[in-house]
Amino acid sequence: MAQNDPGSPGIGVLRGTCLKLVSAKGKERCQGEVASVVLDDGSVTFIFTGSNGKIGFRGNGQAVRPGRGGLAILPVFFVMIGNDGYPAPGSCTYSDPFSGKAATVECSVQSTVGKVEGSFRSNGQPPMMQRLSR
């Protein structure tokens, strides 16, 4: 969950405020946390938890590129809505969660079931990290 480097395989959870979560079912209430999962293959998934279940935006962590204002951009190719997955081009833009300032995660994709979006702002605390064992 570092800026331009997806990091070692593991899970990071940020706490804060979910600002928006929109699925194929429409606008959802969402919980005040977002998870980032980095796998051995370099893929990165940002997971939001909404009133209808989890929504995950999966992208290629090897292709993260710098954005404006110190942000990083993860190209997204897949979205999970509950137990269903769909090819979904789009991106997640995020800031450094270790900066000591409130971090943001904003994801948006266009899938075969419609536009899916999530927006989150952290409480400024670093993420809780757990490494994945091999």
Image (tube, helix red, strand yellow):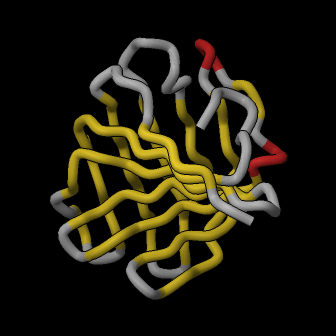
Rendered view: 67 above or below 41: above
Q: Quadrant of the C terminus?
A: bottom right
Q: Residue at x 49, y 48 (%)?
A: 107
**Residue 104 shows up from this direction:** yes
Picture quarter containing residue 4? top right
The residue positioned farthest toward the front in the image shown: 133
Q: Residue at x 63, y 59 (%)?
A: 132
Going 25% across and 69% down the picture, which residue do you hit? Answer: 26
In the image, 72 versus 102, the foreground residue is 102
Q: Position of residue 125 (x, y in %)?
A: 35, 23
Name the foreground residue: 43 vs 120: 43
Residue 90 visible? The answer is no
Q: Residue at x 54, y 70 (%)?
A: 79
When asked about the image quadrant of residue 92, the answer is: top right
Work out which residue is located at the far bottom of the displayed protein and give it: 84
> How many numbered markers are drawn?
0
Q: Quadrant of residue 96?
A: top right
Up/down of 46 relative to 3, above or below: below
Q: Quadrant of the N terminus?
A: top right
- Residue 106 at x, y percent in the picture: 45, 41
19 left or right, relative to 45 = left
Q: Position of residue 11 (x, y in %)?
A: 54, 52
Q: Is residue 65 above or below residue 33?
A: above
Closer-to-camera residue (32/72): 32
